[in-house]
Image (cartoon, rainbow, N blue to C red):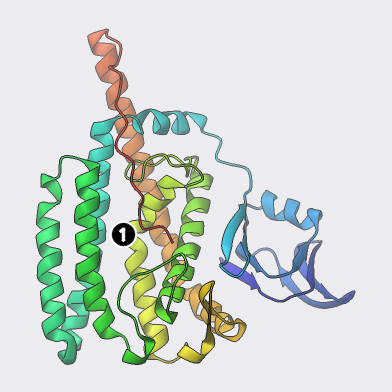
Amino acid sequence: MSSLYVDRRGVTLKADGEALVFYENGERVGTVPLAPLSRVFLRGDVTVSSSLLGKLGERGIGVVVLSGRKAVPTMLLGRPHNDAARRVAQYRLSLDAHFCLRFARAIVEAKLRAQAAFLGERRDSEPRSRYLLTLSLKRLTSSIAAVDQQATIGSLRGLEGAGAAAYFEGFADLLPERLHFSGRNRRPPRDPVNAVLSLGYTLLHAEAVLALYGSGLDPFVGFYHTLDFARESLACDLVEPLRVEIDQHALMLFRSEKLRPEDFTHSDAGCLLGKAGRARFYGEWEALAARLRKLLAESVSDVTAAIGEAAAGATTAVASSGAHPPAATAAPAGDGDGF
């Protein structure tokens, strides 16, 4: 399955049988079959017919609209999974502090281990950066060892933050100096690397939302990222261990000079990737997107299984005791890294 990226002003998309058709100035200028599509990404002044939206929804093809200069995502989704009981179990477990803490520990450890594995691989092939990468790895290893000792989600967030600081120090040393990357910044990103990381994280997050929605889980109700208005917290949970995939991709794009500083503009809105650069970015993105969807599908399957096992265990315990379950306490809320 593949994605279609439409980033062209003044284009109209319509349905014609089993095909998506492009019109420009009233003339038919292109056709794409619907069968191989799994996602359609729209950016800019693109018009989509209602009949096409209906067909995309029927086939479970997600539509992601990246609006404005910051490419804020809006998703148009098909029919959700039919198992509402799965969502009910998710809601109950989101109020179970013990389940949330176990889940959060697993997420943070997976993220730290992924970061350490990436830096470890680069250290073996980057003599110039070996000393700094070794220091970063020591700090990450220390954070990994401390995960199971954390008694609250708040302390896990602090541990994750310390690991991120160590990781990005090592990551910065791998990038060309002319990119002026000195660490993660966002909202808005202030340099080319952060602009690409933000775009990649945004696309990854959109994929996580679509995967969760299709599996019957509620993307807004998480276990590590707790409830927050307008935040798809469970999607935020799932993307944490996969952010390193975006980091590796960004490193490749800049080292190969498929993206260069001149592809970006700077303004009060931050550092933004221009249209020519976006075309190259999306051209390189699809191969990674296929891998990310596979990894997300595995993660969603694991989460669904964990929810099912925990819910079944709670039901069995209550039935055997004849008692009502105790009132649960919600886990502390946190900000997360966002996009």
**Residue in view at x 38 percent, y 60 percent:** 295
- In the orientation shown, which residue stands out farthest toward the right? 26
Amino acid type shown at disc 1: Pro
Q: Is residue 328 above or below residue 118?
A: above
Bin the neighbour count of mark 1 within 10 Å (Cα to Cα): few under 14, some 14-19, many 20 and up. many
Q: Position of residue 177 (x, y in %)?
A: 31, 90
Left or right: residue 108 compared with residue 140: right
Examine the image and state in which quarter residue 24 appears.
bottom right
Question: Observer-nearest residue: 24 or 176?
Answer: 176
**Residue in view at x 61 percent, y 82 percent:** 275
Left or right: residue 164 compared with residue 69: left
Q: Position of residue 274 (x, y in %)?
A: 58, 82
Q: Position of residue 269 (x, y in %)?
A: 54, 71
Question: Observer-nearest residue: 56 or 227?
Answer: 227
Quadrant of image for the N terminus: bottom right
**Residue in view at x 26 percent, y 35 percent:** 99
Residue 221 appears in view: yes
Residue 298 appears in view: no
Quadrant of image for the C terminus: bottom left
**Residue in view at x 44 percent, y 65 percent:** 201
Q: Position of residue 250 (x, y in %)?
A: 39, 78
Question: Observer-nearest residue: 209 or 188?
Answer: 188
Q: Which residue is mark 1?
A: 241
